[in-house]
Amino acid sequence: MLILEVVRVLTLSIVSFTVACVATPAFTKLLIRFKAAKQIRRSGATPIFSELHSGKEGTPTMGGVIVWGTVLSIALALFLLSKIFDGVFSYFDFINRAETYLPLATMVIAGILGLLDDALGVMRIGPHGGGLKVSQKLILYFFVALLGALWFYYRLEWDTISIPFIGNLFIGWWYIPLFIFIIVATAHSANITDGLDGLAGGVMLFGFIALTVVAFVLGRFHLATFGGVVIGALLSFLWFNIYPARFFMGDTGAMSLGITMGVIAM
């Protein structure tokens, strides 16, 4: 049984890496064609930072679409194929109400919100060169986290946390504010980490690897498979981001991956 689950995780990780690698060149050309390029913010408060990063201006952004787009495409494809043909496709299908509905949904929703922020930045709509303010992003993180917290608490009836070497601790409705804090913190941290060639992708790769291993050990195999698909897409992103970066992740990637990491942890 465990061997089959290991095969499922590794196989879909490889499939995800391959799909993302095939899609990346065409997507990069699309970004260049529509001039979806990075704009360096110039507030005047960070002249040295702005000068050091001026050479990166014009690099395509929104590359995070490749990551969450690959995950969504594979998830939907396997789900539909499992309904039509069953058999091996049902074995690989990892969409599951208790484990992967919320991570997948929040990844896509956050990815779309981040994409809108990136578009504002490209069009120079907003303060200091374009895009949403930090306060506006935090509000978005809060509402996404609130929806997730309510789903976990009322629909999935989660009201405990697991403390290593101690066991489960019942916290009741405190699960909601704790959930919100974790999601906002991971989303904002990912957004801050993003900015240099592949930095956020590399940091989050190790985070998702760790969480995938934990999910597998806990027997949450659908969630572990979901994590494997994310890892495969992230590896492809990093492959094309070996210095100098071909494109940046953008808020669509940092926001979706940061929030999803927090959801998986919870």
Image: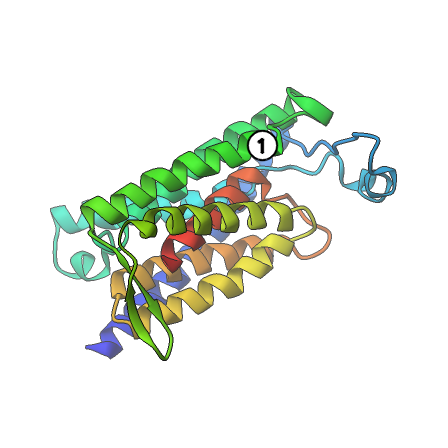
- Residue 22 in view: no
Q: Is residue 167 left or right of residue 237?
A: left
Looking at the rendering, in which quadrant would you find the N terminus?
bottom left
Q: Residue at x 28, y 69 (%)?
A: 168
Q: Is residue 32 left or right of residue 263?
A: right
Residue 259 pos. (x, y %):
45, 47
**Observer-nearest of 175 and 230:** 175
**Observer-nearest of 82 and 64:** 64
Looking at the rendering, in which quadrant would you find the C terminus?
bottom left
Residue 254 pos. (x, y %):
54, 45
Question: In the rendered image, which quarter is residue 149 located in?
Answer: top left
Q: Secondary structure at mark 1?
A: helix
Amino acid bearing label 1: Ser
In the image, residue 258 above or below residue 132:
below
Question: In the rendered image, which quarter is residue 38 located in?
Answer: top right
Q: Residues within 10 Å of mark 1 (few under 14, many from 20)?
A: few
Q: Residue at x 74, y 32 (%)?
A: 41
Residue 112 pos. (x, y %):
44, 33
Residue 245 pos. (x, y %):
68, 49
Q: Residue at x 67, y 46 (%)?
A: 195
- Residue 229 in view: yes
Residue at numbered disc 1:
135
Q: Residue at x 33, y 47 (%)?
A: 176
Q: Is residue 119 left or right of residue 171?
A: right
How was this image coloured? rainbow
Q: Is residue 58 left or right of residue 212?
A: right
**Observer-nearest of 4 and 100:** 100
Count of numbered circles on the image = 1
